[in-house]
Every structure is written in C-alpha cells, then in structure tokens.
Amino acid sequence: MSSIRFKSFSSGSCGNCYFIGIFGDGSRRCEAGVLIDAGVSPRRLKKELQADGMCFDDFDAVLVTHDHMDHIRALGSICKHIGKPVWATAELHRALAFHPMSRDWIGRHRVALEEGAWNEIVPGRIRARCFVVPHDASQTVGYAIMLDQFKFVIMTDIGAMTAEALNWARQADTVVIESNYDPEMLRNGPYPIELQARIRGGHGHLSNYECAEAIEAFRHDGLRHIFLCHLSEHNNTPDLAWRTSLPAASGIPLAPLPRQTASPLYILQD
C-alpha cells in the first residue's frame, strides 16, 4: 500500500502553504503530490522539502484556496522559478491575473478547476474537488482531495461552516480545519473593534468553539487525523485551540499546525 504524507510549511497570517503526497510502499520517493497555497518563498520551500529528503519534483501542481496575500505571497515566484501548474477556479484566476503577487508569471501556468466536479490533477493518482466557503476574498474554496483511495479535506479561512464543507469532511480520512481565534482573547486583545467585527462576522475566520462544533458534526469512524490550521498569533494559542477541540475529536489524533515554522512530515497512511 502507498504511503500518504502531509506537511505544513506555515499556517497563519504570516503565510500558508501545505503539501500532501503519495509515496511508494516503504520508500521516501514521492510518486505524486500537490501544494495547497503558496505563502512561503521557493528558497524556504526548497529548504523545508530537503529537510525531509524531498525536492520540487515531489509536487506536481499548486492548488489555490483564495487570493489573500498570506496564501499567494510567493505564487508568482513559484511560477517563475519552479513552473508548476496552478489550479484555481475561473473566478480566482481572474483575480490572480491582476494581483501583484501573481500577475507577471502565472499566465502560462493557469489551469481552471471545473467547479462541481472532480478534476484530474495528477491523472490516475490525485483528483481534487473544490467547494466554496464564506470568506472576504474574491472567492474562497476548500478542497476535497483524493490520493488514490485516500480522501483529504482542507478548509482554511472559513468565516462560517457550511453544509457542503461538513459533507466532504464526513467522508474524509484526514481533515485540516481552521481554528483561528478564542473569542475572549479577541475581545480583550490588541485588534480594533472594526477588525474584530470582520474576523467574527461570518466572512472572516472560524473561532475555536466553532471549529469544535464542526468537528463534533463531521467526526466519523473512518476519520484518522484532524489538524488545526491558521491559528491567530494574537488571539489564540496552540494549547487553547487544541484543548477546545479535544473533547469533540473524541480520541481521533488532533494537532495544531505551527504558525511560522514547518510541521513534521506526518504519515497519514502507511
């Protein structure tokens, strides 16, 4: 059986970038993989991949969730220096064509996702399907990704949970879900009232409690791992996010992803 491995390079407002891939049975060789978002530089990406015995050849494409800076800061540079296909919805590609972080280099790398259908990212190995979530970008999507028969779901920067997002999570082997802020820390923290209202207003970010409620709703017997992503630096702590969702996880391995540093290379299936 192939091994499925996952790594976060950064997860938060400082930058977001994740890797998921299929590795050969008993080997460190990646047979097919994708990046999700491009919030870290190619130089840092290369360094973090090399730390786990990997290289740029170990991912075949980049999937974009939305066009906020922390998710596409390095997209143009990755297109220029690495040259992988960039998959996004037609609406997102229209925004990326004019964004200063992507407009100069994305042109020939653009591939449009068909919404409401599975897209062959790596033929025969990796398929992806997007679902729209509420967030104040041009458009924001989560992804259900099939790696052979392994189903991985990621939903970051989601202002409120949706029925469609829950539906995909209920089918997943692994879920990555935002747990951005603690309401009390946000209320008593350094952010102005306007920014606080934006964060909790339904098109901003998911609180720890909303994340825990979602986990309670999508938890199922086949779920193997849950990762908490996009934790706020000022309005949350890894321990607080973890403790809030731990009862809902009910024994399923649960881990917060680091904000500014890389995570371990997690083996999701071996």
Image (cartoon, rainbow, N blue to C red):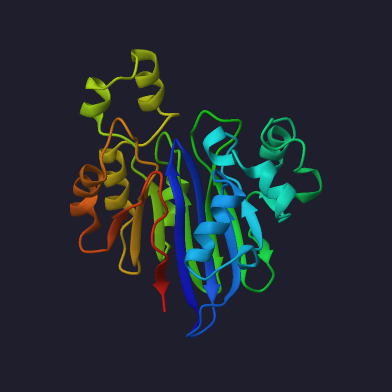
Q: Is residue 239 left or right of residue 153?
A: left
Decide: is 78 above or below 33.
above
| Residue 196 visible (yes or no) | yes
Residue located 20% across and 60% down the image? 250
In the picture as drawn, the residue positioned furthest to the top comes out as 193
Side of 170 relative to 147 (left or right): left
The single residue placed furthest to the right in the displayed view is: 108
Between 37 and 262, the one nearer to me in the picture: 262
Residue 102: % across, % down: 70, 38
Q: Is residue 114 visible?
A: no
Determine whether 217 is above or below 91 in the image.
Answer: below
- Quarter that holds the C terminus: bottom left
Residue 40 x/y as whole percent: 54, 46
The residue that appears at 31% across and 44% down in the rendered structure is: 211
- From the viewer's perspective, is 81 left or right of 180? right
Q: Is residue 228 left or right of residue 11?
A: left
Q: Who is closer to the viewer here, 101 or 218?
A: 101
Tell me where residue 212 appears, x and y as whole percent: 26, 46
Establish if 182 lies above or below 217. Answer: above
Residue appearing at x 30%, y 34% in the figure:
181
State the residue at coordinates (30%, 39%).
210
| Count of numbered badges drawn on the protein | 0
Which of 31/173 is in front?
31
